[in-house]
Image (spheres, grey):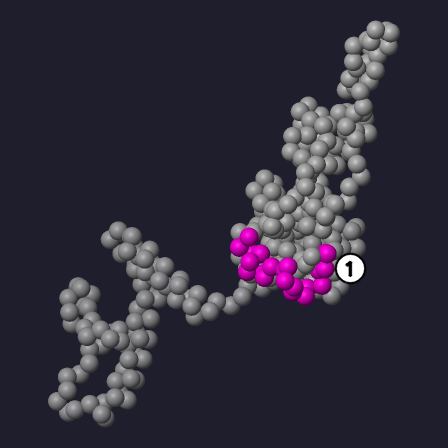
């Protein structure tokens, strides 16, 4: 009689009977709240994981904390599915005894899972409001991380964590799940969460929150501050020094009319200042030179001092 696939048998005993050893059982285990913060595997990742365990058995044990799964949700679910089909998985667990389960979960998942910035920002926002026992009311406790600490731990900017916090606070649950799954950026989710009628566009998209977010118009760009404008000018000045003489002349020729108009405006503005200061200036004081404020000479078209 041929043994069924994936089953194991022992050689016949002296009496001529064969025995089948008991397979490793997979107990029913619940997820710890910290494990739920991490995004689940995609269908493709889960299929690959299950196939690896089928071939090589479970290599990394399921980490248990407070009687629940702290790390290894995907491996656990794969073992459960394989066990249903009589596949030996070599299931095993290990208790977590470290000092900080939050940092352990991050360390065990973020680098291994290659999570994007929006996913990490959402995880950081959840960790910043997580307290022992799963209290996520937003009230800080001795166990809670600050937003800055969570941002550093997940290697994201604090503004990104703030945006993710708004998504968790104001968005529908499906919105946060879409960010966690890596389907939309946290900035787009935050923009969508500003609406108090999020269910309407989602319903119009047949319940597809990702499609609803994509249909929402982008917010208008923020007006640039004086600091932003100065930075642009500073960047241009650096860029100018990298141009060769021909490129510089070509640029000036291309914007000749605009440059002349700006110079005339500067000279007119300087003339007003000079007239206001004329009464206080000594009679024998030399007249200030025309040109840029603070420059004691101007150049003629030939490039010589006027």
Q: Is residue 303 above or below residue 104?
A: below
Asked whether, in this view, residue 91 is left or right of residue 151, the answer is: right
Quarter of the picture containing the N terminus is top right
Q: Residues within 10 Å of mark 1 (few under 14, many from 20)?
A: few
Q: Position of residue 302 (x, y in %)?
A: 17, 63
Q: Is residue 189 above or below residue 300?
A: above
Which residue: 79% across, 30% down? 25
The residue segment tinted magenta is 133-153
Frontmost residue, 235 versus 71 = 71
Asked whether, in this view, residue 228 is left or right of residue 269, the answer is: right
Q: In the current view of this chain or complex, which residue is farthest to the front?
A: 14
Query: How many marks can you see?
Result: 1
Callout 1 secondary element: helix
Which residue: 29% across, 52% down? 242
Name the chief secondary structure element in magenta.
loop
Q: Position of residue 253 (x, y in %)?
A: 30, 59
In the picture of the structure, the residue carrying the numbered disc 1 is: 200
Task: Judge whether residue 142 is colored magenta.
Answer: yes
Which residue: 31% across, 63% down? 256
Residue 39 seen anywhere in this rendered image of the structure: no
Frontmost residue, 15 versus 205 = 15
Q: Is residue 43 above or below residue 99?
A: above
Frontmost residue, 14 versus 218 = 14
Quarter of the picture containing the C terminus is bottom left
Which residue: 26% across, 51% down? 244
Residue 58 seen anywhere in this rendered image of the structure: yes
Q: Position of residue 36 (x, y in %)?
A: 71, 48
Task: Judge whether residue 26 is colored magenta.
Answer: no
Q: Is residue 156 above or below residue 85?
A: below
Frontmost residue, 79 versus 305 = 79
Q: Find residue 277 and report its image quarter.
A: bottom left
């Amino acid at each position: 009689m041929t043994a069924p696939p994936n089953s194991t048998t022992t050689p016949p005993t002296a009496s001529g009977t064969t025995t089948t050893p008991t397979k490793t059982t997979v107990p029913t285990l619940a997820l710890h709240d910290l494990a739920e913060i991490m995004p689940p595997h995609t269908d493709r990742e889960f299929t690959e994981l299950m196939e690896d365990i089928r071939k090589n058995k479970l290599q990394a044990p399921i980490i248990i904390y407070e009687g629940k799964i702290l790390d290894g949700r995907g491996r656990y679910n794969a073992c459960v599915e394989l066990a249903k089909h009589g596949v030996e998985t070599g299931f095993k667990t290990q208790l977590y005894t470290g000092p900080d389960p939050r940092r352990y979960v991050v360390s065990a998942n973020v680098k291994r899972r290659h999570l994007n910035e929006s996913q990490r920002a959402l995880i950081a926002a959840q960790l910043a409001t997580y307290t022992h026992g799963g209290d996520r009311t937003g009230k800080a406790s001795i166990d809670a991380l600050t937003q800055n600490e969570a941002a550093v731990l997940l290697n994201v900017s604090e503004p990104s964590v703030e945006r993710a916090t708004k998504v968790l606070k104001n968005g529908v649950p499906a919105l946060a799940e879409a960010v966690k799954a890596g389907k939309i950026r946290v900035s787009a989710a935050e923009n969508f969460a500003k609406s108090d009628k999020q269910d309407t566009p989602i319903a119009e998209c047949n319940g597809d929150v990702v499609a609803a977010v994509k249909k929402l118009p982008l917010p208008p760009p923020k007006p640039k501050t004086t600091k932003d404008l100065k930075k642009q000018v500073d960047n241009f000045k650096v860029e100018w020094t990298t141009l060769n003489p021909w490129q510089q002349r070509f640029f000036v020729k291309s914007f000749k009319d605009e440059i002349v108009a700006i110079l005339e405006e500067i000279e007119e503005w300087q003339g007003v200042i000079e007239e206001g200061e004329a009464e206080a200036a000594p009679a024998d004081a030399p007249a200030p030179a025309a040109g840029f404020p603070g420059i004691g000479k101007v150049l003629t078209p030939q490039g010589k001092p006027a």
